[in-house]
Image (cartoon, rainbow, N blue to C red):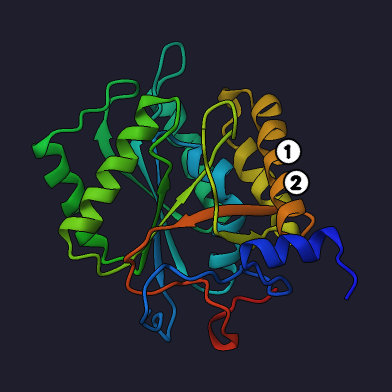
Amino acid sequence: MEHTRRNLLVNATGIVSGLAIGSYATLGEKDIGEPPDRKIKVIVCGGHPGDPEYGCGGTVAQLTKFGHEVVLLYLNDGGWPPTSSTERMAEAKKACEILKARAAYAGHANGHAIVDNAHYDDFKRLVAEEKPDAVITQWPIDNHADHRAIAMLAYNAWQKMGKKYALYYYEVSDGEDTLQFSPNRYVDISAMEQTKRAACYAHASQTPDRYYELQDNVARFRGIESGYKRAEAFLAQMQSPYDVFPLKEKYVLRS
């Protein structure tokens, strides 16, 4: 058999390409349960408005295109002088409309996240009220403290709620913000790039020219890894009860 670079990547990592929404790799459990055989609800957590859009806006667009419900749960409203909270929330609303998602807020202040027992409980209540089938959150080794905070809050909620839904992590500005990220899931976002771009550019106050180019370079690189033009990468949390992106025809979201 001829060993191409793509074949070597597949053989080395267990990635199987050719499906539009992602690839399957074991979660490290002997018996992984079946994902819900219905439309699902996914919460995507972000430290600030714009983080979910940049990190996994293409995946959000894929999910909502096929009728799944997505909530973008922001830790704070993004307000930071000279940009007001009102302006940032208006940008987030526009981005969510583009992605056909819904915005929600955890009520922290930008740059002043608090991770203590009371805020763990508050965040858990927010998640419990949404009744998600999956939560996608930021990576706990990010340079921004708000990103690390929401990762810990999301992990604690998952743990305290009995690990009853799937949990994943995503990256932003890999190398500049996210560090030491080793994904085991890839979602093909090639057909969703324009939608993702529009959602990111909805955050007009946040220098989207600079940050979109940076994040698109990440998407191109993850595409090289997984055999797509562009991809978003995720790390599935071990001990999740099921995988919402398994290699099974009936659950795969196709474009």
Q: Amino acid at mark 2?
A: Arg
Picture quadrant where residue 173 is located: top right
Quarter residue 231 falls in: bottom right
Q: Is residue 30 above or below residue 85?
A: below
Give the camera-side residue of 248 and 98: 248
Point out which mark residue 24 bears: none
Q: Relative to 72, does residue 129 appear above or below in the rendering? A: below
Q: Position of residue 98 (x, y in %)?
A: 59, 52
Q: Residues within 10 Å of mark 2 (few under 14, many from 20)?
A: some
Residue in view at x 43 percent, y 67 percent: 27
- In the image, 30 versus 107, the foreground residue is 30
- Residue 110 higher or lower than 172, as above or below: above
> Residue 72, percent across and down?
42, 50
- Residue 220: assigned label: 2
Mark 1–mark 2 distance (CA, rounded to whole Å): 5 Å
Callout 2: helix, strand or loop? helix
Identify the element where label 1 is drawn: helix
Count of numbered circles in the view: 2
The amino acid pointed to by label 1 is Asn
Residue 108's quadrant in the figure?
A: top left
Q: Residue at x 56, y 23 (%)?
A: 205
Q: Is residue 227 visible?
A: no
CB contact under 8 Å: marks 1 and 2: yes
Residue 162: percent from left, percent from top: 18, 65
Q: Which residue does the numbered mark 1 point to in the structure image?
A: 217
Q: Residue furthest left?
A: 118
- Residue at the spot 60% in from the left edge and 86% down from the top edge: 249
Answer yes or no: is residue 14 visible.
Answer: yes
